[in-house]
Image (cartoon, rainbow, N blue to C red):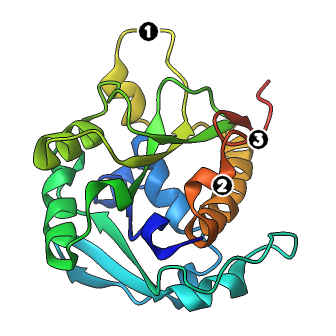
Amino acid sequence: MKAKDAIELVVFLGNPGFEYSRNRHNAGWLLAERLPFFPVLTWQKKYKGRYAALDGNRLSAFLKPEVPAAAEDFLPKVHFLMPETYMNLSGEAIHAAASFFKIPPERILLVHDELELPLGTAAFKFSGGLGGHNGLRSMNACFGTPEFWRFRIGIGRPDHRDISGWVLSDFSAGEEPVLEQVLAAGAAALTEALFRGPEALLPEWNKKKIAATE
C-alpha cells in the first residue's frame, strides 16, 4: 500500500458515560477496545475526546499470520479518536483533530453502529448516504462532504418506531455472543485495513456475515 492511499485518522463513534457504555450506539467504542494493539495505545484528553496515535511500522506485529506483506512505504503514523462530544456533535471533535494534523476527509475512517445492517454483519464503505445517523450527519456538516470511509457494525432495525430508544439501549444477553464475534472479526479486519488500505478488503467486506443470529 502506498502512503497516499492510507487511512490517517480512525474515529470510534459513541457517547461518553457509563450509562451508554453497552448501548448499540456505542458499537464503535466497543470495537476499539477489541483492537489487538489497544493495550499499547496511550490515550490523552485532546480534540474534544480521547486521542492516541500509533506508528504505522508497528501495525504488522498485530496482523494475522496469513495477511500478505505490504510495501514498506505505508503511513508512518495512524491517529485514533473517541469523541466525547456526544454523538450529534462528533464532527466537531473529528474536525479539530483533522485540522491539526491536516488530514483530508477521504483519509478518515469512522467506526459506527449501522441500522441498515443486521446484527452479525459488518462492512467497509466509502461515501454514500448518512442513513439518519447523527454521528455521520455531524461529520458531513463539519466537513461539507460525505466522502469519507466507514466501518459499519450491524445492529439491525427494531420492530417498532422508537429508533432513538433502540440505539440507546444495551445489547441484550442473547445478542452479546454474536456481538463479541463481530467485534473480534471487525477489529482484525480494521487492523488489516490500516496496513493494506480498506480498498484491499473489498468486496469481501462489502457486507460480511460474521455470525448467525437465532
Residue 1 in the image: above or below residue 115: below
Residue 133 in the image: above or below residue 8: above
Indicate the position of residue 200 as horizontal and vertical percent values. Answer: 66, 55
Q: Quadrant of residue 173?
A: top right
Mark 2 burial class by Cα count in 10 Å: few <14, some 14-19, many 20+: few
Considering the numbered disc 2 on the image, is that residue within a helix, a strand or a loop? helix
Indicate the position of residue 180 as horizontal and vertical percent values. Answer: 69, 52
Q: Earlier in the sequence, mark 1 or mark 2?
A: 1
Instruction: State whether residue 167 appears in this view.
Output: yes
Indicate the position of residue 87 as horizontal and vertical percent values. Answer: 24, 46
User: Callout 2, which amino acid?
Assistant: Ala
Residue at x 71% of width, y 87% of height? 61
Residue to which mark 1 is pinned: 160
Q: Which mark is residue 210?
A: 3
User: Callout 3, which amino acid?
Assistant: Ile
Residue at x 36% of width, y 9% of height? 161
Q: Are marks 3 and 1 in contact (CB under 8 Å)?
A: no
Mark in front: 3 vs 1: 3
Considering the numbered disc 3 on the image, is that residue within a helix, a strand or a loop? loop
Say left or right for 190 vs 142.
right
User: Callout 1, which amino acid?
Assistant: His
Mark in front: 1 vs 2: 2
Distance from disc 1 to disc 2, alpha carbons, whole Å, reads 37 Å
Mark 1 burial class by Cα count in 10 Å: few <14, some 14-19, many 20+: few
Indicate the position of residue 21 as horizontal and vertical percent values. Answer: 41, 55
Say left or right for 11 vs 184.
left
Q: Are marks 1 and 2 in contact (CB under 8 Å)?
A: no
Q: Quadrant of residue 109?
A: bottom left
Residue at x 15% of width, y 49% of height? 143
Residue to which mark 2 is pinned: 200
Q: Residue furthest top?
A: 160
